[in-house]
Image (spheres, rainbow, N blue to C red):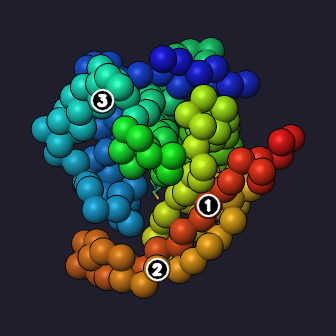
Amino acid sequence: MTFATERLLLRNYKTEDWERVHIYGADPDFSKYELWGPNTLEDTRKFVREMVEQAETHPRYKFDFAVCLKESRLLIGGCGIRCESELSRVASLGWAISPEFQNTGYATEAAKALIEYGFQKLNLYVIYATCDTRNAPSYRVMEKLGMKKVGVIKGTKEVKGRIRDSYRYEILPSQVKGN
Ligand SMILES: CC(C)(COP(=O)(O)OP(=O)(O)OC[C@H]1O[C@@H](n2cnc3c(N)ncnc32)[C@H](O)[C@@H]1OP(=O)(O)O)[C@@H](O)C(=O)NCCC(=O)NCCS
């Protein structure tokens, strides 16, 4: 499976992607709001293995992709849309862009393609995303995608010794611009 956007190519992960993924996976600052990380080499290899296996699952209901620059094919991050189960019409979005490529709209561009896929091909009812309330770049992406903040969830999980409060943003098919 691949998606082409103006500047990006979203494709299934390959085993050899671990090297590029590890650049940001191993960075403690990158995953400071997340349950995972900083990754050991084995953590990153396991993650990429799981992503390769996910792409081979039938029927597939989780769609995580390597985000690559269209021109050079360089892997710069990941983006995914995950239905809650095989039959679910509810899915969550997630994203990661390597620090040197951040703040140029890549996460938004990749996620926009997955929202389109979710509503047009997966017939989803709602797509949501959550993030730590301190993760401004992540909720800014949600806002730029036209997602609406529907709540603040207090104490969703304990992350790196701190109880995390999360924002939840959602988008419905009728809220996609152009629909
Ligand atoms: C969240 C993340 C994927 C965003 O990727 P990105 O490609 O930089 O996203 P975009 O360029 O599309 O948008 C980022 C927006 O955040 C803004 N931003 C960046 N740092 C910010 C800050 N400290 N405060 C407020 N806004 C900030 C940018 O200015 C940009 O908004 P703009 O286009 O209105 O200027 C990236 O920061 C990342 O990988 N972070 C680490 C992993 C992570 O936290 N993933 C999400 C888990 S929920």
State the image quarter where residue 22 is shown. top left
The amino acid on which the numbered mark 1 sits, given as a three-letter code, is Glu
Number of marks = 3
Residue drawn at point x = 38 percent, y = 66 percent = 33
Residue 150 x %, y %: 62, 73
Residue drawn at x 56%, y 15% is 72
Task: Estimate how packed mark 2 is, as few (under 14), some (14 to 19) or many (20 or more) residues with alpha carbons within 10 Å.
Answer: some
Report, in whole angstroms, how far the alpha carbon at label 1 lies from the one at label 2: 14 Å
Element type at marker 1? strand
Q: Badge 1: few (under 14), some or many (20 or more) residues near its Cα, within 10 Å?
A: many
Residue furthest to the right in view is 178
Q: Amino acid at mark 3?
A: Gln
- Would you name the residue on which mark 3 appears? 54
Secondary structure beneath disc 3? Answer: helix
Marks 2 & 3, CB-CB < 8 Å contact: no
Which numbered disc, 2 or 3, marks the residue that appears first in the sequence?
3
Horizontal arrangement in the rendering, residue 32 relative to residue 46 (left or right): right
Tag 2: residue type?
Ile
Q: Is residue 12 left or right of residue 22?
A: right
Task: Mark 1 or mark 2: name the one nearer the start of the chain.
Answer: 2
Q: Which residue is mark 1?
A: 170
